[in-house]
Image (tube, rainbow, N blue to C red):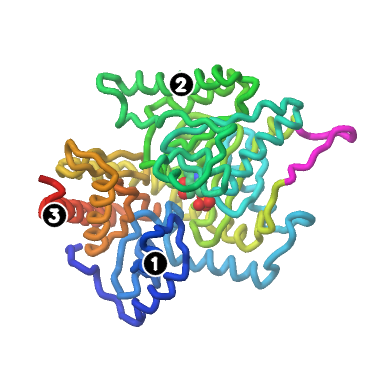
């Protein structure tokens, strides 16, 4: 591929400024009040495979796969047809009172794919509601078992678990906390397990042990009889693809087991192929948690759906007899929505019949190796990641500030987009998680654009006097 400003031309049939005017009625996630109503967002009008096309006809590689979700790629007719068929046959049934074929088929399939005895599925509308349901389940479980004081929840800095009140409260991205209230009474956040930021002179192993000890110390400080659960993404995705040192997840699970604390593995990003497995907890991190939350790649983003997988071990303790029964009074109108489940069934079928897990395991190391070639660029501080998720952290050597982080991210974003790649950085961090169908030569294209985009961003920063 030759790099050219503006990407390759597609037919221009949209009035972009009119589309942007309409889009300004939409209060987007993380909307800035400074630019509200004045945004000039890129409007995407078409998508196919790993590419999206904007309203001016530019073709862009979808670097983040939408929002870590379009795992099998855009334009899958089979998924659209499965959804249409389901909508025509039977669009909706109340999950509060009846069953439907797609939700049953999908629940059984997820139970088969999930590790250990995680054989029951509570369907939700997305990742936040899956996490919210997991946290509510912790309270329900301990109330049922007659220990209502065992409800403190432990999360981590740099963790991200969603946008409901509870899931946002256990999230630890400090920059997201400025203007929204959080539950503080029963939520505790540990330091980030980011080895890149470990104290000087500390080995990754020592750092891992220190972070694990911090978890155990926190449980002991609060009192194990008061701690209900620990929630952790195996890799902290939105926190900047933070990969904790090897053995960290397993050691944390052992701490939780020692103190009868439930372990919730938030696999909203890592499941359905991103790390080369349907669920990454067991094959990649050697843990069988008590609960797993997932969403995103479950339908490859074609339609919203989330799920909370719960272990039989927990549910067995709650099975009531006539004298002792309780309702898990948590649920959504769209829990197990037939159309969403039909999409998920077809999506999982595609992953299986096209051997996409093997493909992801094959191209993942290449993706990581190629991205690491960018580490020679002065603006690149670190490249990290695993499988098909990675982060290129940029920084001006010796300088750190929120304003600079924004400035770097904005310039990298602008140049990469002009060259044909969607980056959408988290501040100064370019998070890459392409559709898992990406090929080696498409990875080469992506890395070539990143190199030029970062080089051009560095030139801008120097020209503007931000980098002397
Ligand atoms: N958990 C993790 C690990 C996530 O990355 C996200 C979203 O990015 C969520 C939960 C929330 O998912 P949703 O946006 O579908 O509610």
Q: How many labels does the image show?
A: 3
Q: Position of residue 438 (x, y in %)?
A: 35, 55
Q: Is residue 311 left or right of residue 156?
A: right
Secondary structure beneath dot 1 equals strand
Q: Mark 1 points at which residue?
A: 48
Q: What stretch is highlighted in magenta?
A: 318-329
Q: Position of residue 180 (x, y in %)?
A: 49, 47
Q: Is residue 442 left or right of residue 265?
A: left
Estimate the spatial distance between the alpha carbons at disc 1 and disc 2, rounded to whole Å: 46 Å
Quarter of the image with the N terminus is bottom left
Q: Mark 2 points at which residue?
A: 214
Estimate the spatial distance between the alpha carbons at disc 3 and disc 2, rounded to whole Å: 43 Å
Q: Does the residue labelled 2 lie within 8 Å of ligand 1?
A: no
448 in magenta? no
What residue is shown at x 66% (from left), y 46% (from top)?
A: 122
For marks 3 and 2, the one nearer the N-term is: 2
What residue is shown at x 72% (from left), y 58% (from top)?
A: 100
The answer to whether 466 is drawn above or below residue 314 in the figure is: below
For marks 1 and 3, the one nearer the N-term is: 1
What residue is shown at x 43% (from left), y 43% (from top)?
A: 276
Circle 1 packing at 10 Å, graded few (<14), some (14-19), many (20+), is some
Residue 289 shows in this picture: no
Q: Mark 3 points at which residue?
A: 464
Front disc: 3 or 2: 3
């Amino acid at each position: 591929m030759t790099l050219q400003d503006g990407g390759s031309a597609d037919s221009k049939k949209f009035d972009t400024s009119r589309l942007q005017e309409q889009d300004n009625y939409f209060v987007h996630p993380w909307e800035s009040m400074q630019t509200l109503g004045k945004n000039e967002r890129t409007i995407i009008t078409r998508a196919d495979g790993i590419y999206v096309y904007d309203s001016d006809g530019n073709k862009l590689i979808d670097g983040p796969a939408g929002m870590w979700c379009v795992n099998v790629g855009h334009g899958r007719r089979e998924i659209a047809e499965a959804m249409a068929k389901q909508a025509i046959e039977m669009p909706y049934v109340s999950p509060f009172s009846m069953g439907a074929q797609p939700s049953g088929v999908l629940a059984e399939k997820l139970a088969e794919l999930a590790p250990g005895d995680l054989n029951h599925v509570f369907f939700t509308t997305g990742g936040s509601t899956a996490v919210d349901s997991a946290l509510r389940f912790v309270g329900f479980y301990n109330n049922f078992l007659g220990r209502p004081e065992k409800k403190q929840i432990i999360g981590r800095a740099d963790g991200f678990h969603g946008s409901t009140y509870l899931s946002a409260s256990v999230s630890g991205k400090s920059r997201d906390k400025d203007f929204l209230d959080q539950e503080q009474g029963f939520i505790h956040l540990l330091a980030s397990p980011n080895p890149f930021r470990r104290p000087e002179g500390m080995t990754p192993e020592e750092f891992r042990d220190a972070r694990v000890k911090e978890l155990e110390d926190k449980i002991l400080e609060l009192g194990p009889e008061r701690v209900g659960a620990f929630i952790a993404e195996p890799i902290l995705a939105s926190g900047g693809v933070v990969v904790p040192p090897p053995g960290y997840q397993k050691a944390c699970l052992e701490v939780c087991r020692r103190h009868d604390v439930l372990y919730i593995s938030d696999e909203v990003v890592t499941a359905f192929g991103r790390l080369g497995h349907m669920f990454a907890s067991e094959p990649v991190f050697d843990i069988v948690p008590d609960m797993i939350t997932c969403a995103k790649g479950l339908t490859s983003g074609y339609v919203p759906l989330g799920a909370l997988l719960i272990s039989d071990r927990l549910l067995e303790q709650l099975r009531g007899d006539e004298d002792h029964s309780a309702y898990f009074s948590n649920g959504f109108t769209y829990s197990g929505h037939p159309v969403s489940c039909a999409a998920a069934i077809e999506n999982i079928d595609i992953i299986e019949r096209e051997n996409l897990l093997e493909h992801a395991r094959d191209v993942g190391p290449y993706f990581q190796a190629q991205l690491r070639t960018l580490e020679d660029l002065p603006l690149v501080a670190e490249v990290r990641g695993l499988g098909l998720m990675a982060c290129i952290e940029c920084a001006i050597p010796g300088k750190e500030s929120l304003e600079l982080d924004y400035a770097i991210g904005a310039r990298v974003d602008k140049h990469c987009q002009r060259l044909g790649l969607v980056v959408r950085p988290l501040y100064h961090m370019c998070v890459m998680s392409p559709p898992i169908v990406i090929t080696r030569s498409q990875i080469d294209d992506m890395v070539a654009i990143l190199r030029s985009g970062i080089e051009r961003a560095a030139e801008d920063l120097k020209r503007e006097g931000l980098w002397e």
